[in-house]
Image: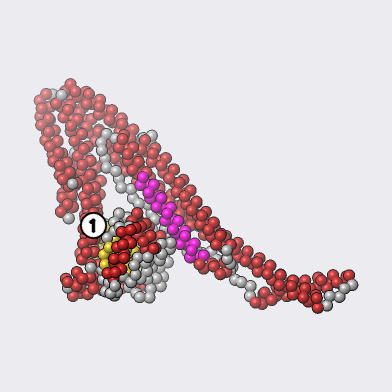
Amino acid sequence: MADVAKAVNVIELALRACTAYDRPDTAARLTAAKESLADPVLHVVVAGEFKQGKSSLVNALVGATVCAVDDDVATAVPTYVRHGTKPEAALLYEPGRREPIPVADVRKHVLENSDTDRVSGVEIRIPRKILAGGLVLVDTPGVGGLGSPHAAASLAAVSMADAVLFVTGAAQELTRSEVDFLQRARALCPVVACVVTKTDFYPAWRRIQELNEQHLAAHCPMPLMPVSSTLRSRAVKANDTALNTESGFTSLVKFLTDRIGASAADRLVKDAAAEVLALSDQLDSRFQSERAALADPEAAARVVRELTGVKDRVEALKSAAAKWNQTLSDGITDLTSDIDHDLRARVRVVIAEADTAIEAGDPADTWPEMEAWMQSRMANELLANYELLRIRASELGLKVGDHFHEASTMIMRRPSVTDPTPMASVADFQHKIDLERMRITKQAMVALKSAYGGALMFIILGSMIGVSLGPIGIGIGLVMGHRGLRDEKKRQIQKRRGEARNAIRRYCDEVSFVANKDSRDTLRRVQRQLRDHYSGLAEELNRANAQALNSAADAAKRSQADREKRLKDVDAELARIQQLRQRAEAVAK
């Protein structure tokens, strides 16, 4: 907090400099940095399998029952717990719509047996000290295995979070799917920790902790903390420090405060210091140019020529033909094509796997499992496609930044590219197909029809050649009836398989259609963000250079007495700018 206060003071000093030196363009970015320091938002996603104590963990952390806990049903939608001056709740809808609700009604919207089809999340605000620094705890639905839609949605939320707490119970060691989830979460989020809950309920929790530490050390090293939400809740009610220590939450709170809160605050402080340093560079360049023209009148013409050349380069930075702009435009076009091709390739693989599974059985028997598998498989592939988009978009942002800095005359910090919108949510399977088998009565009618037709055909044929078949005709009729029934069953199975294949293709087409639209919208947002950021920087450079050029031109026209007087003022301004730079550098350390 001391570093944050120092950063705020430096920004306020820089804002006064913006007013004094007529730099409203830079003041806008400094104001945004100041607002971020005043109201930081740190999202901590609480993830894990069903019924592992995620909601109880969140309740114990904040010392209040804010997340619904039930032994029979589980959390169905994410719950966002953040700081507020008074207890209040709201339903979150897409896109960005909120509907206030009574806090007492939160439970029916959060649990899985409630009507939450249109609700994307529930936000709860409460006055708690642990949340006052901007911490937002996100209680997510259970993972349900790595390949489930819930896991895909949780991983998408993880990619947008500042930290992840993965919750596993003390009843058993980490499973293969849990370790796989942790590995992918660690690749998506910089800070991940594993929390073992319910230590008060299982006497052998220390042995489970040892096994989990071995699994994590072998596959994905990260902190592991055993806790008891029950003991924590009792400790908070009784204000019992010893019991609170025994619950294990002391280490968890320290981890949230020191590792997550401190790292986020440090990032915001460094970003703010970088903004002030950028302003100092521009102001210093302006007054250094003027000083050079004042100190050596003969060199004034040279300074003006150099600044005019800089002006041409800055103007080129603002044009559509600038290298960074071309890199951005070409990169977005290529990335859009690559993401679309990657998604199509993944969907083709899923359809081929589905076709193989359909041919191996009867959809009348396997369709319910096929629907669940299809949703899970598509969710997993969409998540992989989203990860590719996220990585490539970040790489493009860095490449554009490098090209801008190569062409610019000052060192500017790179922007942080906002993570793309998650594409891991998939629609329900809405395609219904006819899976009804032939009933006994229909089978009897098909067999009787085939038997009658077959027997009649042979009896007529025998009468034509003068041979009476007698009982043989009945046997022939039975054989023909059995064959006809078998062919009809085979035809209906093929019909059901065809309907199943068509339903899967329609589902994949719908999901691909939505995902393609989402990815294209995301890339357009990335393009606009990078374009606006670097265009703004180019405009700032242009304004700074124009001021320096005007000052140098005025200096060349001054008399000797005016130059000497102005030289003292410029030296004083440079001293102030140097003090501002030193204070910003001290904050950035």
Mark yes or no: residue 201 visible.
yes
Looking at numbered disc 1 in the image, what kind of residue is underneath it? Arg
Where's residue 301, x and y in %? Answer: 22, 23
**In-image side of 109 versus 467 (left or right):** left
Decide whether residue 393 is among the magenta residues. Answer: yes
Decide whether residue 234 is among the magenta residues. Answer: no
Write down the quadrant of residue 495 in the picture. Answer: bottom right
Where's residue 587, x and y in %? Answer: 17, 47
Compared to residue 27, the image places residue 134 above or below, namely below
Magenta stretch in the rendered image: 370-395
Nearest the eye: 123 or 426: 426
Q: What residue is pinned by disc 1? A: 259
Where's residue 533, x and y in %? Answer: 31, 43
Compared to residue 263, the image places residue 333 above or below, namely above
At horizontal 33% and vertical 50% (from top left) the residue drawn is 418
Nearest the eye: 123 or 373: 373
Secondary structure of the residue carrying numbered label 1: helix
Nearest the eye: 125 or 143: 143
Query: What is the residue that sits farthest to the right in this orientation?
Result: 466
**In-image side of 481 versus 462 (left or right):** left
Compared to residue 149, the image places residue 531 above or below, namely above
Quadrant the N terminus occupies: bottom left
Q: How many marks?
A: 1
Q: Main secondary structure of the magenta part?
A: helix
Compared to residue 374, the image places residue 568 above or below, namely above
At horizontal 18% and vertical 50% (from top left) the residue drawn is 8
At horizontal 12% and vertical 37% (from top left) the residue drawn is 575
Write down the quadrant of residue 262 in the picture. Answer: bottom left
**In-image side of 438 versus 383 (left or right):** right
Query: What is the residue that sits farthest to the top in this orientation?
Result: 298
